[in-house]
Image: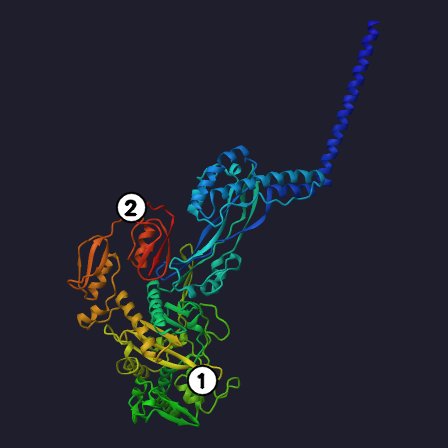
Amino acid sequence: MAKKSENAIRNVAVSRYGWFVLLLSLVFIVIIYTIFKIKYAEGAEWRKLGASEIVKKDKEVPPARGSIYADDARLLAISEPLYEVYMDFMSQGMVKDTLLKYVTPLSEVLAKRYPDKTAGQYKKIILDGWDLSRKELKEIERVKKIEPGKRVKTRSGRIRIIRRDINYIEMKELYTFPFFNKISSQSGLFTETKTMRNKPFGRIAGRTVGSISSDPKKGGQSGLELKYDTILKGKPGIKTRQRVRGKWIDVILKEPSDGMDIKTTLNVDVQDLTEQALRQKLTETNAESGTAIVMEVATGEIKAIANLDRLKDGRYAEGNPNAFSYMTEPGSTFKTISLMIALEDGVVKPNDKIHVGDGLYDYRGRTVRDHDWRKGRDKGDISVAEGMYTSSNVAISKMILKGYESNPKKYVQHIHDMGLTKKLEWDVPLKGIEGTAIVRFPDDKSRSWYSTTLPWMSFGYETQIPPIYLLMFYNGIANGGKMIKPFLTKAFMKENEVVQQFEAEVVNPSLCSEATLGMVKDILRGVITEGTGKAAASDLFPIAGKTGTALIAKGGGYEGYYVSFCGYFPADNPQYTCFVGLRRPEGVPSGGGMAGTVFKTIAEGIYTRNLVSTPVSAPRDTLHAYAPAVKNGSLEKAKLVLTKLKQPFSANGNGEWIRAKRDTLNGGILFESNIPLKKGTVPNVIGMGARDAIYLLENAGLKVRLIGAGKVRAQSLNAGTTAVRGAAITIELN
């Protein structure tokens, strides 16, 4: 009986074991089936869903845009990183209790540092972000049960915390705040980088340097930024953003290639001087606009180019590229071209006489008028040279008619042969006919040639020569007859190494014979000493040039004047050529009295700053009157300049950096006290020029933003406070 009972128990056990094995086998089969189904039947869909949860779509890694430098390596434009600040409330390590513990102190410190929102507003943004993330997580779970492959759009993974973009120093500080000082998977804090274009010297050469779009992908919008956008912008890389252990990290798939830097020919000090001189005269005459260009004679390098337009509020700011876009009749500055042609062909000599009478000359139904014809004075006969000195339209037109009335094509061909109509590529982007010289031929079907075109063309009408071409021509005279193209871009650079260097293009190796060139030079000096250019004369050095005053064509008539002056200095050893033009100034128009005085200010400013090696024979008192105002700054440099200019000075201090003022008791300059400099603190740069101020501030480890021109009148960080390396400081100049 016992044996039978044991068999029954064994049978039951075997039966149960069999069912258990069968059950496990079925489970195993289901698992295998599910694995195959997930991997092969639904594999693509699940892989896509998984990737969407841990890997974000490939994104571009923006390259660093190249910088733009002045001729001495000072920065004119640089890209600086800025950061957008976000919180990811989906971060797996974020815990509600910890968030609630730190949200109040975090909100308070945020409000103190970024006061555009109150602590209460910051707290609400953070708590609302947390609540939103919980709702969105529930929605994700709900959708997964119904439609496993469907993606739910969420917003709580990218909540912007600080409204404005912050710099690197601020970003590092942010990671020290309560709660934000934890690892990012717990705090949810993350930043996205963008770049901002910063101009350390503010508006200086603003139109020439140009601007870029707020959208980095669109690149440059004007000036050098647009012209060389492909050089500056570089090539983007590629990255993905992956979630690892609850933290989003960037995985670079392809490194970006940063843009190249551009070194320009511009000199910050000369540019500053040129803009100030032009702006002052524009304001004084309430002119519509103006331009001034300074070019180095031997090299063709443009050292300054100012283009100022009057705004609605009466201020003047960089606007149109006036140096290239003044497509207007140049007036009497063109007479030097006519003079060179006539002298070269032997039509006249400087002392040949021409009858001008009362300054009125009727030719084929039109009257040529001199600027002083209303005086009714009979001047009789004057020499060719005197005709240039006094800018006589009658004398110049008769001179050209004498040589070319029967063959006007010969005269115009000379203009073309000089290279004055050659189409040139400039360093700034232009539209249409801007930056080209338009001179018609007698048989030109597109531009009618009239019976009176030749005499009017001879003194600068019925033709269009932009300022840049006139500058190039006068520089050719100063450069021994070799006419070279003015240029702005000196080199492309990569990591401080020159990739490509540029030099001036020779447009015409010889404008005329040496004999003709000598006569033209003598006459241009006479314009300053004897004629309409007297206002441009300097007691420091000789100047040569020509004035221009022209009516502006408008709607078949004329409205307003365009006054100009173009010349070079020192006349006996030319170093710089300069063009100045003012459009529609108020008052009695005068190329010498308006544009010429701007030229003089620029020339004397460059001379006193750069100490051009020209003998100085002017009396001490005269020199003192033209000495530059001495700013606070380097004692050694100030003494050097004043010694060269024979200016008296005395010193109460003898440190490297000093404060300076005029010595009202003894005359000259008084260096009255040293400027204290303490390592690790912000220096006091009030009263300094831009160069010295930037030097000291950058040596202190600060990033400088400059506004205005002249002397420093305010600085955003107080002198004597701790200088945090990499911190930004703004200095405001007069």
Residue 377: percent from left, percent from top: 30, 92
Q: With 464 as the anchor, is 601 left or right in this view?
A: left
Q: Quadrant of the C terminus?
A: bottom left
Pick whichever, 22 or 542, lies toward us. Answer: 542
Residue 683: percent from left, percent from top: 30, 50
When asked about the image quadrant of residue 618, the answer is bottom left
Pick whichever, 456 or 178, lies toward us. Answer: 178
Q: Is residue 151 above or below residue 344?
A: above
Residue under label 2: 679
The reply to whether dot 1 and dot 2 touch (C-beta < 8 Å) is no
Q: Amino acid at mark 1?
A: Glu
Q: Is residue 275 visible in this depiction of the protein?
A: yes
Q: Amino acid at mark 2?
A: Lys
Residue 158: percent from left, percent from top: 56, 45
Instruction: Using a 10 Å C-alpha cutoff, classify the residue at mark 1 as few (fewer than 14 neighbours), some (14 to 19) or many (20 or more).
Output: many
Residue under label 1: 462
Q: Residue at x 18, y 57 (%)?
A: 651
Residue 644: percent from left, percent from top: 21, 65
Q: Is residue 208 above or below residue 579?
A: above
Q: Quadrant of the N terminus?
A: top right
Residue placed furthest toward the top: 1
Q: Is residue 172 visible in this depiction of the protein?
A: no
Label 2 sits on a secondary structure element that is: loop
Label 1 sits on a secondary structure element that is: loop
Q: CA distance from mark 1 to mark 2?
A: 64 Å
Q: Residue at x 65, y 40 (%)?
A: 140
